[in-house]
Amino acid sequence: MADTESSPPGVEVGELLARADAGEPILLLDVRNDDEYETWRLEGRRPIETVHIPYFDFIEDAAACVDRLPRNREIVVLCAKGGSSAMVVDTLRESGVASRNLAGGMIAYGEYLQPVKVPSGDPGLATWEMWQVNRRGKGCLSYVIRSGREAIVVDASRDVSWYEEFVRGLRAAIVWVLDTHVHADHVSGGPALAARSGSPYFVSAGEGFELWQHVTPLVNGQELRLGGEGGVTLEVRVMRTPGHTPGSSCYLVGRRHLLSGDTLFVKSVGRPDLGGQVDAWGRALFHTLRDGFATLSDDTVVLPAHYAGLDDVGPDGVVSASLGTLRRTVPELQIREEEKFVAAMRAALKPPPAQYDEIIRVNLGGATVDPEKATEWELGKNQCAAGTRHPAL
Ligand SMILES: [Fe+2]
């Protein structure tokens, strides 16, 4: 019988990722079934050695499965929710194989948020700070900007208490909650975070789309002032940037940090096909990228809302690129004619994210969803970029 009382505590996702990112030679044993394993895997910033043996193989012939594993290193076992992997840990330990369970499994991985400080690039003016919050399992990025005792949260994930605690840790209070657009791949935490903090909330659905919830309207070029006290303020300028969606907005923080939403990523542009109007939205995206961004200098630091793979993460842990680099390297930004750009968008059409229409309805305020259902909708990586580079998950 398994002696569960002597089992070591589970490994938390944050601990596992930190150790794997630091290059510790962890061996992962993934016990999910074949199709779950093929569609979505746990990734570190360096490759993690992984063995895949489905749980049912352990049920059928545990000894044969144990024989496939090394005995001289620690094994971390993972499954979808952390239940069957805990049973495999017991089996392994009975056989003398050192192992620990990944607490919460892939669900916990999909919801884990890792804050990484964005270098300000100007230490002499360290009056504000910005954190890129990396939802590693999905490739979603949200942001916390603090100036003085005030903070803005942009593109919050559903775990709103995480942001509340994080901002409290910065000794600040949330004064604005913004979304760059009506997300299609995850349920926004924005409305709930705004309600709980008593802050105004802004998102734009764009012309022709109805928002069923209250937002505080912001217009193109409007500036939010953050910090106030002590005479130091940070300006956050709203830029209306239609294309990925008709209501997409970007936010210019200070003079050179652009929260680009799903309009521009570090290796590609946002997909304009999620409304079934790839021609019209593609044209809008072309003009946003060419004309809307024309006044931004090459040294603008682009900070997107998603990324495709861990090779998009820089050595400092931040997903970012200078606009000048993107102007030179992103293939879609080399296209100078509107029709050719639209044709490229049309050629890159791919299936939408699972349940995207239901997720959009919730994010418009037209429906509610319970947390278990939302978790199910959000399994797997985002699919927000145009082009073929993005993993076809
Ligand atoms: Fe999006």
Image: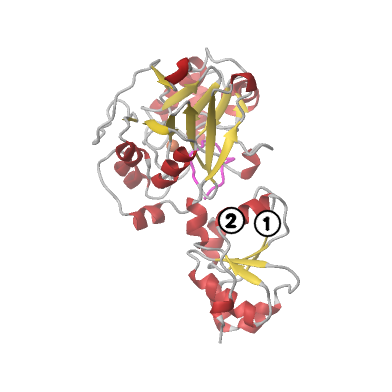
| One can see residue 57 in this view | no
Residue at the extreme right of the image, as rendered? 72
Q: Position of residue 21 (x, y in %)?
A: 67, 50
Which residue is rendered at x = 69% and y = 38% of the image?
315
Which residue is rendered at x = 60% and y = 22% of the image?
323
Q: Does the residue tagged 1 have its C-beta within 8 Å of any atom of ligand 1?
A: no
Mark 2, other Cα within 10 Å: few <14 / some 14–19 / many ≥20: some
**Residue 229 picture quarter:** top left
Quarter of the render that holds ligand 1: top left
The residue tagged with tag 1: helix, strand or loop? loop
Q: Is residue 313 above or below residue 24?
A: above
Labelled pair 2, 1 in contact (Cβ < 8 Å): yes
Whether 114 is among the magenta residues is: no
Along the line of sight, which residue is nearer the eye, 23 or 385?
Answer: 23
Q: Position of residue 269 (x, y in %)?
A: 53, 31
Over which residues does the magenta segment extend?
Answer: 382-393
**Residue 157 picture quarter:** top left
Which mark is drawn over residue 48? Answer: 1
Spatial distance from mark 2 to mark 1, Cα to Cα? 8 Å
